[in-house]
Image (cartoon, helix red, strand yellow):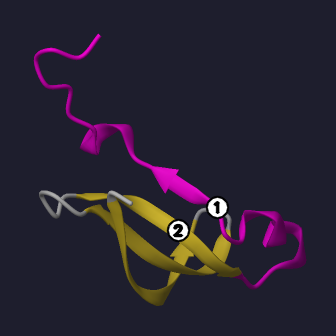
Amino acid sequence: VNVGCGPAEQRLLLTGLHSVADIFCQSCNTTLGWKYEQAFESSQKYKEGKFIIEMSHMVKENGWD
């Protein structure tokens, strides 16, 4: 509900070539990480449909417990 998804693009990551789409906050448009759309190596197929959230993009506001 709070996360949008951009267009998929191919990227060469540490674990090989993947088709990924950036995910972002719907409220502030901050890029949060990416979603694996397609893995091209059979050993990486388990990642398809999974999300990576980069901790460096997470912000803790006052009032959170």
Image: magenta residue range: 39-65
Residue at the spot of label 1: 50
- Taking the spot 39% from the left edge, 58% from the top edge, the residue there is 33
Residue 37 to residue 29: above or below: below
Look at label 1 and name its amino acid.
Lys
Residue 16 to residue 61: above or below: below
Which badge, 1 or 2, comes first in the chain's sequence? 2
Tell me the quarter of the picture where residue 26 sits.
bottom left
- Taking the spot 45% from the left edge, 65% from the top edge, the residue there is 34
Residue at the spot of label 2: 35
Task: Characterize the local packing of mark 1: few (<14), some (14-19) or many (20 or more) Cα atoms within 10 angstroms.
Answer: few
Q: Nearer the viewer, residue 33 or 27?
A: 27
Q: Residue furthest front?
A: 1
Instruction: State the image coordinates of residue 40 (x, y, percent, origin top left).
Output: 75, 85
Looking at the rendered structure, the secondary structure element under dot 2 is strand
- Total tally of numbered discs in the picture: 2
Image quadrant containing the N terminus: bottom left
The answer to whether the residue labelled 1 contacts the one labelled 2, judged by CB atoms less than 8 Å apart, is yes
